[in-house]
Amino acid sequence: MNRMDAFLTRLDADAALIHRPENIRYLSGYAGEGCLFISRGVHAILTDFRYIEQAGRQAPDWRVERTTAERKASGIARALAEEIGAKSMRVETDYLTHDDFLQLSEALTGVALRSMECIPEKLRQIKDAGEIACIREASRIASQAFINILPRLHAGMTEIDAKIELEFEMLRLGSEGPAFDTIAAAGVNGSLPHAVPSKHVIAEGELLTLDFGATYNGYLSDITRTVAFGRVSPELRAIYETVRDAQRLALEAIGPGKRCCDVDRVAREYIDARYPGAFGHSLGHGVGLFIHEQPRVSANDATELLPGHVVTVEPGVYIPGVGGCRIEDTVIITSDGFINAMHAPKQLIEL
Ligand SMILES: [Mn+2]
């Protein structure tokens, strides 16, 4: 069954409006701004002058409706709803602003607006062969970029310098852009899981955590590596080895038929026994057209992993005033195990 048939089968409404960019791209192939109107008989892209030609190229089978200042998307949606006699419509109430929703409600009087209930996101969890090929290429680019910049990392450079090296290298290797805001956190900044790269000058004896990803055909990858500048203290080395062992144990536990919460627990119990409370985020998340997708590899998500799921495995230890470490791979669940899409090394590298 193709994506659109799968979507319509689950829709349980006369029509749908799609606004979330990843869902627009997934269902239509169109990667510009605007929204989709979908019913059994009508597949339409609603967008403005800037994207009319692009929509025709990327989604040749779709009807394209041009929006203007006078002809708003909400008015076109009403006209299309009348054309098909729609009585019910699903919209992305988890994405639209309150004002967007009020505008749609006013335009679509007589049509019952209901939550999308993440129907596209649920379909997007299981990747097909083409999507997996894109994620593998985005992963290959990110891994190779890390390997390529290692000789250029040195004490005396800033976190921002490290970020520039990584993003430049990924672009040169074919990335369409960073998958998300690159994290580069050295020394005591390493205890901030989502540190923003700063002018902090990296010194000998510090760990540097790099969390980054590439984009290929719109699909993302996500990798974290932590490297040492010169010789680090036994305390930091022990933190690194704990995270690396926790990540290896989690990878040994992951595979088809395994529940996300059980994989999370393996890494969490190992770290909590050594550094209680120092691993405060979930073990991982789905990756695809968006960087944080379903399922969550967390204590709260009992999803059973299936072939085609793509998730990260990223334990970490964060100790304020001391520093931190995270190690992350993007993995693809297969029928008999998983493929680790990342080939960058994981032993402690002392630059
Ligand atoms: Mn991640």
Image (tube, grey):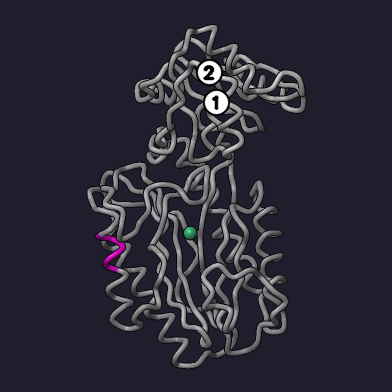
Q: Secondary structure at mark 2?
A: loop
Magenta region, main secondary structure: helix
Residue, x 35% and y 56% (percent of image)? 297
State whether residue 219 appears in this view. yes
Q: In screen coordinates, is 218 left or right of 303?
A: right
Residue, x 32% and y 83% (percent of image)? 274
The spot of residue 314 in percent (x, y) is 42, 64
Residue, x 61% and y 21% (percent of image)? 45
Question: Picture quarter containing residue 53?
Answer: top right
Q: CA distance from mark 2 to mark 1?
A: 6 Å
Question: Picture quarter containing residue 163?
Answer: bottom right
Specify the quadrant that holds the C terminus.
bottom right
Three-letter amino acid code at the position of disc 2:
Thr
Residue, x 37% and y 39% (percent of image)? 126
Q: According to the image, label 2 marks what residue? A: 109
Check whether the beta carbons of the residues at disc 2 and disc 1 lie within 8 A of each other.
yes
Is-magenta flag for residue 264? yes
Q: In screen coordinates, is 39 left or right of 161?
A: left
- Label 2 CA crowd tier, 10 Å (few <14, some 14–19, many 20+): few
Is 345 situated above or below 39? Answer: below
Q: Nearer the viewer, residue 51 or 133?
A: 51
The spot of residue 131 in percent (x, y) is 47, 38
Q: Nearer the viewer, residue 35 or 166?
A: 35
Q: Nearer the viewer, residue 23 or 325?
A: 23
Q: According to the image, label 1 marks what residue? A: 105
Q: In screen coordinates, is 195 left or right of 69?
A: left
Is-magenta flag for residue 22? no
Three-letter amino acid code at the position of disc 1:
Ser
The spot of residue 286 in percent (x, y) is 42, 50
- Total count of labels: 2
- Label 1 CA crowd tier, 10 Å (few <14, some 14–19, many 20+): some
Find the magenta span and give its range: 262-266
